[in-house]
Amino acid sequence: FPTRRSSDLLPERYRRNVEPLVALAIAAAATTRIRVGTGILLACLRDPITTAKALATIDAQSGGRLAVGVGHGWNREEIADHGVDPATRRARTREHVLGMRELWEHDVARFEGRFVRFGPSWSWPKPVQRPLPVLLGGASGPRVFEEIADYGHGWIPLGGSGLAAAVAELRDTVSARGRDPRELEIVPFSSAAGVSQVKLDAFERAGATEVAFEVAVTDRSTALRQLDGLADVIGKRR
């Protein structure tokens, strides 16, 4: 990960990111019930054929517990370091996801796009979940909502500010495409610090189907304290 974004130093936590698919495989193998997912997989920087097989393997071996959170990427230096023109990242993300979905959903898959091309191909195992849910991350607005309506199964917003109005707009966009908006997943990301029943209730009223909490990764004692707090709140909610 580049140490800078343009002239700005990046936060310390970016040094600590683990490889997401390896980490998900470990988490899925060590558990039996929790859902595992990426937040966020930069699909445009990964080979779609290899990535599709890895994700399908995790879903198959975990018994259908995977959610694929996908983003376009915001760090232009990182994207360029992977040999990708940052200006093409949204179009590439779309084709990479659509190419992976072809491999997940068809016994013999093929895809012909500007950035992704492959002829008749086998790819096994297949995911347990049909479809394997792909959730797009990004700020609210017509552009990302149209992308979700085009090729996604849900949205990962950042925080809860204005969430209710944004969810209503997203549902209208999906409905206009002839899809059922009730099938959408809405999984906001929020800080684990200060989590409460009141906060969870607010997310639920706004339309969230699940909430992902970011836990501190640079300080072990802080991370453990935040996990204990989450366990307490979730335990009471159950």
Image (cartoon, helix red, strand yellow):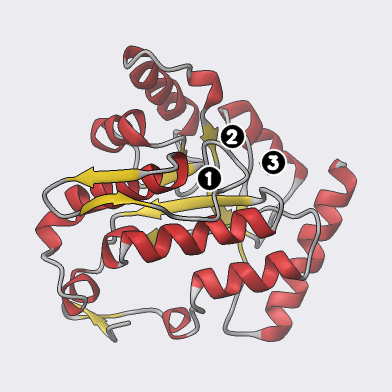
Identify the residue at horizontal 45%, vertical 49% (top origin). 158
Identify the residue at horizontal 29%, vertical 52% (top origin). 96
| Direction from residue 143 to residue 127 in the image, left or right | right
Residue 23 locus on image (x, y percent): 59, 73
Which of discs 3 and 2 lies nearer the camera? The answer is 2
Residue located beneath label 2 in the image: 208
CB-based contact (under 8 Å), mark 3 and mark 2: no
Q: Secondary structure at mark 2?
A: loop
Identify the residue at horizontal 57%, vertical 84% (top origin). 218
Mark 3 neighbour class, 10 Å CA radius: few under 14, some 14 to 19, many 20 or more: some
Residue 6 locus on image (x, y percent): 16, 77
| Direction from residue 103 to residue 92 in the image, left or right | left
Q: Amino acid at mark 3?
A: Leu
Residue located beneath label 3 in the image: 200
Instruction: For the C terminus, give its image quadrant.
Output: top right
Q: Secondary structure at mark 3?
A: helix
Q: Is residue 156 visible?
A: no
Q: Secondary structure at mark 1?
A: loop
Instruction: For the N terminus, give its image quadrant.
Output: bottom left
**Which of 100 and 182 lies nearest the eye of the viewer?**
100
Residue 147 locus on image (x, y percent): 29, 36
Residue 156 locus on image (x, y percent): 47, 45
Quadrant of the rendered structure where residue 136 is? top left
Q: Amino acid at mark 1?
A: Pro
**Which of 200 and 144 lies nearest the eye of the viewer?**
144
| Direction from residue 57 to residue 221 in the image, left or right | right
Residue located beneath label 1 in the image: 188
**Which of 83 and 141 lies nearest the eye of the viewer?**
83
